[in-house]
Image (cartoon, helix red, strand yellow):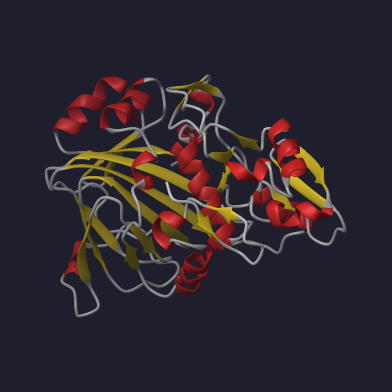
Amino acid sequence: MKVIASGASGLARRTPLHTWTRSDAGTARLRRRLGRAPFVLAPCDTEWRRLAPGWDGCLALARAGLPFHIVAGRRYDRAGDRRRLGAALAEGATVYLPQVHEALPRVARLMVAIRAGLLGAGREESSFLFVVDGRSREGMGLHHDGDASAFWIQLEGRRTVTIGPPVRPGTRQDLPDAMLEHGPRWRTIDLDPGTLFHLPPYTPHRVLCRGRSRALSLTWTRPRRRLTERARLVSLAAWPVASGRATAVPPASRDRLWTQVPGIVERGTLGVRLWTPSGRIDLPATARPLANRLAEMPALPRGVLRGRHSRAVSTLLEHGVLGARDLPAAIVPAHPAALEGWRFA
């Protein structure tokens, strides 16, 4: 994995978004494009392959108790009955795991990077992992996702998506198929493995799979209110990954350190107050260039252990903000029934 130097300080880092934006400058350009129109980005590297387990691994999580829903012909089965899973897939139905980032730490890390690098605090966020052995069968049909910005990552296979011009707020989410007798503003595109697709709010879309497909959908609503500084810190530092057993423990890295949880710098202070999911960490003022870069959960070169930030890095290692191992690809939660996906419609 290539580590990209960015920022005036020259401190090298690589964030999850760099798979599609290549650098901080590319992330800034992407931020300016958001909300204008749908777009597709091809990957710059192969890091997207490590976001989630493969086909069998995803199904194993569902069979281990993670919540899943089944939908075919706009009819939803939210019982999460593992006995129905195999037959539903064989029939070409769409199976999806809601709030899957609670069990996929690398997906949660990407969501943190999108939250901090593109969208900002105070938004309700959701994730869905779609698993389809496609037979060109309708799942959800033509619909829109309301007042939510969505980012899709195609993990395996291809999906064909038809999109149209945005509908008005308040339009019912399930849309009549007659709208697909579209005019010049409708288009159909194929999403190849590794692509990142952005869908602005209220955009009508229909998805068809003609073969095996795994894909992520990550969504955020608009902020509902102005935030206090404390609320901003809490929102940006959220890390909802469930406790449980890692399906595999990654080996220790020889050349980089991995951010383990988000770290957000409090504004308007002389020293550096870094807020994490487990509380506040005080760092020397000289550590601000390093601390400011932790919001997007980057990978850092191991050389920071010997540089001018070495004392701050040691503190971050002691508190578990940095670590020598990458996050695991998946967690089997200790209490699956407590996951938000059971309650998520």
Could you tell me residue 112's position as x and y percent?
Answer: 55, 49
Question: Which picture quadrant has residue 318?
Answer: top right
Could you tell me residue 309's position as x and y percent?
Answer: 73, 48
Question: Which picture quadrant has residue 286?
Answer: bottom right
Count of numbered tags: 0
Q: Point out the image quarter for the C terminus.
A: top left
Q: Is residue 206 visible?
A: yes
Is residue 313 positioned above or below 190 on the image?
A: above
Residue extending furthest right? Answer: 270
In the picture, measured across the screen, residue 154 lies left or right of residue 2, that is left
Question: Which picture quadrant has residue 316?
Answer: top right
Could you tell me residue 216's position as x and y percent?
Answer: 36, 46
Q: What's the residue at 38%, 20% (across, down)?
A: 64
Could you tell me residue 88's position as x and y percent?
Answer: 20, 31
Q: Is residue 99 visible?
A: no
In the picture, measured across the screen, residue 49 lies left or right of residue 242, that is left
